[in-house]
Amino acid sequence: MRRLHDGRMQAINLALFHALHAQHALTDALLWLAQHGASLGAALVAWVLLRFPRERVHGCAIVLAALLASAMAHALAESLAFARPYMAGMGPPRIPHRRRAALPSAHATVMFTVALLLWRRPGLRWTALAATMLALLTGWGRIHAGVHFPFDIAAGLLLALVIATAVHVVMQRASGRRAILHRRPAAALGDGTAAP
């Protein structure tokens, strides 16, 4: 497993890790979120699908984007092979966890992808805010549990920005094509060229 080679960046990463890893009154809540935050995020998307029928196409796109984000994050992490804190001698993890590569965080990538795509819909802004807060707190929880460095979470956010932007562009183009297809029959009727 690898570590950051840049001394200044590694110093910042470690300083942030020690600050966010320190135990305090929120420890139990953060450790719970570290293990269950992703499930809460999935429940939030399920709630959008059930509560907002007009957003179901967008909700299904978010589900597919989340699956893509998970696959990309795991593949990239295995390729980069950066160690987790407990694998780098920073103490045992505070939650059960398998030994595998850390950067980018799959939790952060998926949860921020979901949050960013929810922000694209004006009617889902409060849900997007809840998803964003959940992603941030879960990221903090994963650092607090000793299974991620802060830069792992930041890398997950950056990857989520790329994925969410790409998905949004694809959806916009698909929506534009559907609008063109819907306009063509109407235009033909207006010109009197549509078949009777």
Image (cartoon, rainbow, N blue to C red):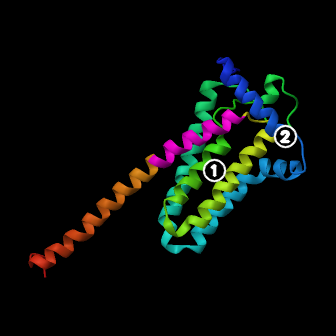
Principal secondary structure, stretch drawn in magenta = helix
**Would you say residue 168 sits in the magenta stretch?**
no
What is the three-letter code of the residue carrying label 1?
A: Met
The answer to whether residue 89 is above or below residue 59 is: above
Image spot of residue 33 (x, y percent): 78, 51
Q: Split into 4 quadrants, where in the image is the N terminus?
A: top right
| The quarter of the displayed image where residue 7 is located | top right
Relative horizontal placement of residue 190, taking residue 88 as reference (left or right)? left
| Residue labelled with disc 2 | 96
What is the three-letter code of the residue carrying label 2?
A: Pro
Q: CA distance from mark 1 to mark 2?
A: 20 Å
What residue sits 47% from the left and 64% below the top? 57
The mark closer to the camera, 1 or 2, is 1
Relative horizontal placement of residue 100, taking residue 169 as reference (left or right)? right
Lower sequence index among marks 1 and 2: 2
| Residue labelled with disc 1 | 111
Label 2 near label 1: C-beta < 8 Å? Answer: no
The answer to whether residue 124 is above or below residue 72 is: below
Q: Classify 10 Å Cα crowding around label 2: few (below 14), some (14-19), many (20 and above).
A: few
Which span of residues is magenta-colored? 150-165
Residue 195 makes an appearance in the image: no
| The quarter of the displayed image where residue 153 is located | top right
What residue sits 66% from the left and 61% below the top? 130
**Would you say residue 154 sits in the magenta stretch?**
yes
Q: Classify 10 Å Cα crowding around label 1: few (below 14), some (14-19), many (20 and above).
A: many
Q: Secondary structure at mark 1?
A: helix
The answer to whether residue 129 is above or below residue 95 is: below
